[in-house]
Amino acid sequence: MFTIYKKTKCKSIFLHSALLFLIFIMMSSFLSANLQMITTSAEEFIRMGVQEYQNNNFERALENFLIAEKTGIKNPDLLYNIGNSYFRLNNIPYAIIYYKRALLLDSSHKDARDNLSFALSITRDRQVDLEENFLTTYLTTAFYYLSINHLFILCLIVLGLIVFFVHLQWRFFDRDNTVLRFVNVLLLFVLMGLTCLTVARIYQVNNNKEAVVIENTVHVYSGPSESFTRLFTIHEGTVLKIHREDNSWTQITTLGGFSGWIVSDTYVRIVEK
């Protein structure tokens, strides 16, 4: 009787361990696909871009950085450098766009956040977020504390620990494994929480509704046509939230909470469709 139970338990733990190891490999592959490490060719263009930037050749620096971006890599430092190049060329709207793109990938990027704040402060329109209470501010800070890449890495570390402790249970299945089981359950809940947070962050990035005005002056109307009442005017560099599009018109809201309709080709989305 004991022998049959022993074999069954051993087989069960082995299957669980194999399954977790398979999940670990799949998540590792998913991580490498999403991190998109800098390739050799992209690294060369970035190096030339940095050199041109240091020599105050901002146009040529921007050209090299944009070529590196077109290779498909997702790197917050590259996006930050593109934003700096646009800023040096006095293209404030695109500088804001790229600072925000960098922060979507790495919300802890202090230089991008500081430069974004400065760029917003010199736009013609007042760029102030709606007031938030302490709890909302705290939760927002916690939500964006870690970048998506860091969350991926934490998920892999926790999953690796689960595989390790399951392996220990398999090795010492004939002993009291109460502590190991408790640790595994605890790690499983941590992994579930990290996974939910990672998925939420990815969803937030992919469904970002922000845009930046790129025209000098844009009139905002009460409806999707110039025949409607003109409500107010916004200017280049103004950050908007997109609600819906109707042919060549878009319903928007400014950071100050003012809403209306503008022509769709007067802005650029932070996350391109």
Image: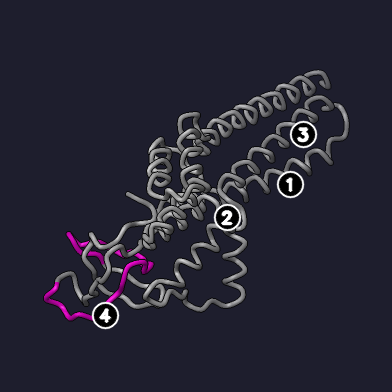
**Helix or strand or loop: what does disc 4 sit on?**
strand
Do callouts 3 and 2 mark residues in contact (Cβ within 8 Å)? no
Indicate the amino acid at tag 1.
Leu
Q: Could you tell which of marks 3 and 2 lies nearer the N-terminus?
A: 2
Q: Could you tell which of marks 4 and 2 lies nearer the N-terminus?
A: 2
Residue drawn where x is 62% and y is 51% of the image: 193
- Which residues, given as a range, are shown in magenta? 226-250
Residue drawn where x is 47% and y is 74% of the image: 129
Residue, disc 1: 186
Q: Which mark is residue 53?
A: none
Q: CA distance from mark 4 to mark 2?
A: 34 Å
Q: Main secondary structure of the magenta part?
A: strand
Q: Residue furthest front?
A: 55
Q: Which mark is residue 109?
A: 2
The one nearer the camera, 161 or 83, is 83
The one nearer the camera, 134 or 62, is 62
Q: CA distance from mark 1 to mark 3?
A: 11 Å
